[in-house]
Image (cartoon, rainbow, N blue to C red):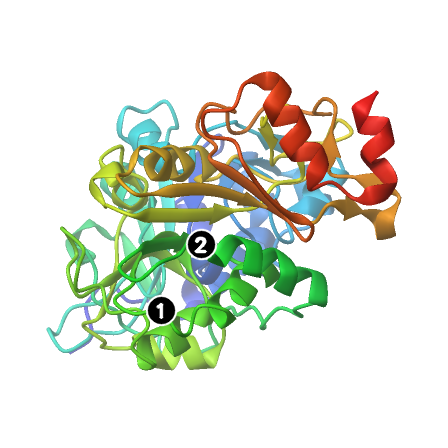
Amino acid sequence: MQHSKFVKQEDLDLSHLIRPGDNIICGQASGEPVTLTEKLVSQRSQLGPVNIFLGLSLSDSFNPEHADQINFDSFGPMGNSRALMDSGVLNVTPVNYGQITQYINDETLRCDVALVLLSPPGPNGKYGFGLVNDYIRGAINKARVVIGEVNHQVPWMYSEGIPDIEKFTTLIETSRPPLKVAASRITEIDKKIAANAARYIEDGSVLQIGMGSIPEAVAMGIRDRRHLGFHSGMAGNFLVDLMETGVITNNLKPFDKGISSAAVFLGHNKLYDFVRWNKAVKLRPSWHTHSGDLYRLERLVSINSALEVDLTGQVGAECIFGKTISAIGGQPDLVRAAHRSVGGHAIIALPSVARGGEISRIVKSLSGPVTTPRSDVDVIVTEHGFADLRGKNLVERKKALIDIAAPQFKEYLLG
C-alpha cells in the first residue's frame, strides 16, 4: 500500500519545503534522485538562493548557468560537476570521503534538506537505499526536510540500515533507468600497469580497487586467484565476473564474511541485475567502508590511482598544474589501512606519462597538494615496472621511481 506522503510529480512545489539559504545535500553517483534535481533547477527562481552539496555527478541536471540561484559545493569536481569547476561556480571543501558523515553529524556540514533516491520495497517489505548508502543516511537523520524519489527501476539491495520513511517529509514515484557508467576502454598500457599491480594480490587477499580502466584491467588479470575478499568505497562492473567465477568469495574476512561491501555500486545493467536482492553484496555507509579499523583486514591490497607521484613517493590525486580536477576521496584512508594491514600492500597505479607522452607523471615535485603521504604508500606501479618503497631512504626511493618513469624523462628526473 502506498504511503500517504506520496505526491504526484507535477504537484511537487519545492517552495513549500525549501527556504532561502537552505543547505541541501543530494545523493551522488548512481544514487542521484534525478527527477528531484531537475525539479530543483526548474523551480530555483521560486526558492531564492540555496546551497547544494554535490558528490560525483553523472546527470545533466546542474549547469553553470544555474549558479544564478544555486551555490554549488562539493568535496571535489567529479563527473559532470567538472564543468561547474571550470566555470568558477563550484566551491570545493577538502575532506576525506569517509569523514563526510561525521561533518554532517556535528553540523560542520549543515544539512537542512536532503534529496534522496530510494528503491521500491524489497523482500522485507521496506524501501531501500538503491545503489548508494554512503553519507546520505547522515543527511536524512539531520535534515529538517527529507524529500525522497522512489524509482521503480532502481534495484533493492541489502544494506546496513533501511530508510525510515517516517523521517521523509514527502515522496514522489518515478520510473527511469538508473544512472550508469559504461565499461572502460582498456589499453595495452593499462594491462601492463595492472599486471605489475596484480603480482601483489595472492590467494586470500582482500581487494580494494576503484573505478576505471586500470582497476578493470586488474580484475581481468586475477581470474586465477581464489578466496579473495572485496571491501571498497565503490564497486564496479568487474565485481560480477569475479564473484560469479569464484575469485571473490569473502569467506576469509574477519567481518562482512561472505559479503562484498561498498558504499556505492556504479556500473551498467549487468551489475545492477546482479546486486538486486543478492545477499552476497551489501551497501555499507562510507564511515564503515573507510573506517580506521580496516587494517584488521589481513592481506588488504588497495590499488588507487594518481595524477602525479614525486620522487619521494608523495601522491597527488586532486590537482595538476594548479587546477583541481578530482577529489581527495577515500584514498588516504584506504591506503593507510592497507599499509597497516598484516600482509597488506598499499599500491598507487598510474601511467608514466600524460598528454600522449609530453608530460611525465613521475615528477620532481608535485604541482598540487599532497593527497596521500609518502609514509603510507608501499608500492608505485607504472607500465614500466614497480617501485617497492618500503624501507627505502630518500636516495633509494628516487632511484626506484626513476626506474619506472618513461625513458624519455629519466635524464631530466636524475638532474
Among all residues in the image, which is located at the extreme left? Answer: 124
**Left or right: 249 in relation to 93:** left
Quadrant in which residue 245 is drawn: bottom left
227, 102: nearer the viewer: 227
Task: From the image, tell me which residue sits under label 2.
Answer: 209
Q: Secondary structure at mark 2?
A: strand
Q: Is residue 135 above or below residue 362?
A: below
Q: Is residue 74 above or below residue 265?
A: above
Task: From the image, tell me which residue sits under label 1.
Answer: 225
Q: Is residue 345 above or below residue 123?
A: above
x and y, in percent, of residue 323 in the image:
74, 32
Residue 174 in view, yes or no: no
Residue at (52% x, 34% y) in the render: 328
The quadrant of the rendering that contains the N terminus is bottom left
x and y, in percent, of residue 66 in the image:
67, 45
Res 412 label = none
Between label 2 and label 1, give the one nearer the viewer: 1
Of the two numbered discs 2 and 1 on the same chain, state the one appearing first in sequence: 2
> What residue type is disc 1 on?
Arg
Residue at (56% x, 54% y) in the render: 196
Residue at (42% x, 37% y) in the render: 335
390, 116: nearer the viewer: 390
> What residue type is disc 2 on?
Ile
**Left or right: 145 in relation to 252:** right
**Left or right: 295 in relation to 267:** left
Please give the count of numbered marks on the rendered protein. 2
What crowding class fits label 1: few (fewer than 14 Cα within 10 Å), some (14-19), or many (20 or more)?
A: some
